[in-house]
Amino acid sequence: MTSTGKLLIVTAPSGAGKTTIVRHLLSTFPQLQFSVSATNRERRPMEINGRDYYFIATPRFRELVDNGAFLEWEEVYTDQYYGTLRSEVDRILKAGRAVIFDIDVRGALNLKKTYGDKALAIFIQPPSLETLIERLNRRKTEDPGSLKKRIERATEELTFKDHFDRTVVNDDLPQALAETDAMVREFLSDPRSN
Ligand code: 5GP
């Protein structure tokens, strides 16, 4: 497959199931490598530094911003920063792999602007706002305050869906996975985006 230099951007409102989809794509397409983002938020118990994120302190994050180390970064929630490191993407592309990103909607739009046809930006859409709230509630990783923030943000992010190359409605997970697989297969084998 001709995957060199390609970037696959997967985005969604929080709770739409994008992490599940990204994990599935990683296990289906060996040429994909996950872009590990940097964040200043607290590590959750199951997370591993360097695998899920590079967990760094706020002053260091700011220093990296000032040094131009990020391709894009966002304050996704109040005082919680997330960013894509240039060094991470360069390393993956230099190794001849295609990059896969799991990032927020604004970051996804910025990366798409930077990479144009080299990138495929997929928006994962929850079947409804009610389902999304239900999923966020079920996850129970958040305290009530931060859950409320996530719901507000997700509601706003849903309005951006028409700005992406493709949309997948995540109602029935196996079907959403099959649809995404087909899109990614086509993109990775398309010689025009090389
Ligand atoms: P979480 O804290 O649940 O891991 O992630 C919160 C949100 O930040 C998710 O929507 C996730 O995709 C997004 N995110 C993760 N890494 C990045 C990044 O490097 N840049 C941007 N803009 N968003 C990110």
Image (cartoon, rainbow, N blue to C red):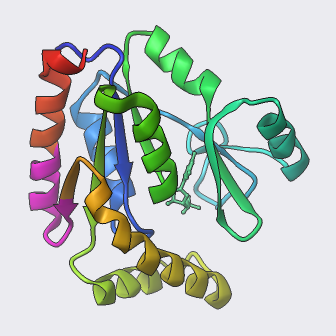
Q: Is residue 104 visible?
A: no
**Residue 184 placement: quadrant:** top left
Q: Outermost residue, right direction?
A: 59
Q: Quadrant of ligand 1?
A: bottom right
**Residue 68 picture location, percent across and down:** 74, 30
Q: Is residue 30 left or right of residue 160?
A: left
Residue appearing at x 63%, y 22% in the figure: 87
Q: Position of residue 23 (x, y in %)?
A: 34, 46
Q: Is residue 47 left or right of residue 18?
A: right
Q: Residue at x 35, y 31 (%)?
A: 116
Q: Residue 139, image x and y in percent?
A: 46, 77
Q: Say which quarter of the image contains residue 16.
A: bottom left
Give the position of the C terminus as an image quadrant: top left
- Rendered image quadrant of residue 127: bottom left
Q: Position of residue 80 (x, y in %)?
A: 72, 62
Depicted 73 relative to depicted 71: above or below: below
Q: Does 164 sit left or right of 96 as displayed?
A: left
The secondary structure that dominates the magenta segment is: helix
What residue is shown at x 62% (from left), y 90% (from top)? 144
Q: Nearer the viewer, residue 149 or 95?
A: 149
Q: Is residue 93 magenta?
A: no
Magenta residue span: 168-180
Q: Nearer the viewer, residue 179 or 112?
A: 112
**Of residues 168 and 54, the one drawn nearer to the viewer in this rendering:** 168
How many discs mark residues in the rendered view?
0
